[in-house]
Amino acid sequence: MSVFVVGLVLVITSFSVSADSDEEYDFSQERASVYSIDFSERFVLPNENRTEQLDEAINAIHFSVEKNPHKSRNKYSCALKFYINSQMPIAYPVEGDVGSESVVMTKEHFIFDDVARGKKFKELDADDSRQFLRSNTYRLMAFLHAGRRISSLSMSSFKKNIFTGINYLKYDVSCYGLSSSKVKDVVIWIKKDDAKDNSRRVRQDPDDFIHITLPEKFVNKIKVIAKKTAAINKVLR
């Protein structure tokens, strides 16, 4: 599966960024993977990215750079993709086995085109309004702890049982936040399915989350990619 082929060096001392960087930047090759031995044998993947440092419920983690589909200061965005044991008790958006964040965005639905969102919700039946807002549970479901930096992650898409016994989660992450030389340890917190409602909390309860520590070698790889991508985004603004 070519999606897991890694073509990068572990250390880049310097690189130049020019006004032509957008044309020169082959972002499709900026990727890194790490996976368990069982996962690599199941999907016939290169041995070089195998590790025994992943938690038992984590089959694989993939980091990639993508063109930002939304209007943003940053043309390129970074993403972390998890292939996890389907029995892992994490919280998913309320409805469905598959979805993307756009599914629960008001701009996705024509019924919100004619009036301001706030006014429209006041006009909706209470059950319709409650159901739509209840389904919008992609936010505050995960956090990234990188050094002293803590940032909320948005689950941009998910698919239950993408393969037998494996669920897929995709989170958008800050390229800039991962690029700092001060970042040593990176831990992802993913909300448990029986966690308290944290939508109105300023401080999160660590016990409400499953903690996934990314392997050090993998972190070093993605820091190189994130730093390069953040620099190119800065030039292209």
Image: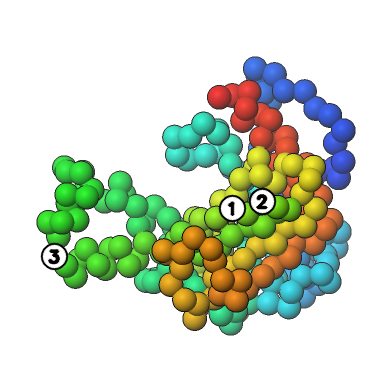
Q: Secondary structure at mark 1?
A: strand
Badge 1, how many Cα within 10 Å: few under 14, some, many 20+?
Answer: some
Q: Nearer the viewer, residue 205 or 132?
A: 205
Q: Provide the residue designation for mark 2.
A: 149
Residue kind at label 2, given as amino acid type: Arg
Residue kind at label 1, given as amino acid type: Ser
Eye-nearest disc, 1 or 3: 1
99 horizontally vs 57: left or right: left
Q: Where is residue 45 drawn, in percent x and y?
A: 77, 63
Which residue ends up furthest to the front in the rendered image? Answer: 202
The part of the image, by quadrant, that contains residue 77 is top right
Q: Nearer the viewer, residue 33 or 152?
A: 152
Q: Provide the residue designation for mark 3.
A: 125
Q: Secondary structure at mark 3?
A: loop
Report the residue at 65% width, 62% height from top. 188
Q: Where is residue 176 drawn, in percent x and y?
A: 65, 40
Q: Compared to 17, does 150 lie above or below?
A: below
Q: Provide the residue designation for mark 1.
A: 151
Q: Secondary structure at mark 2?
A: strand
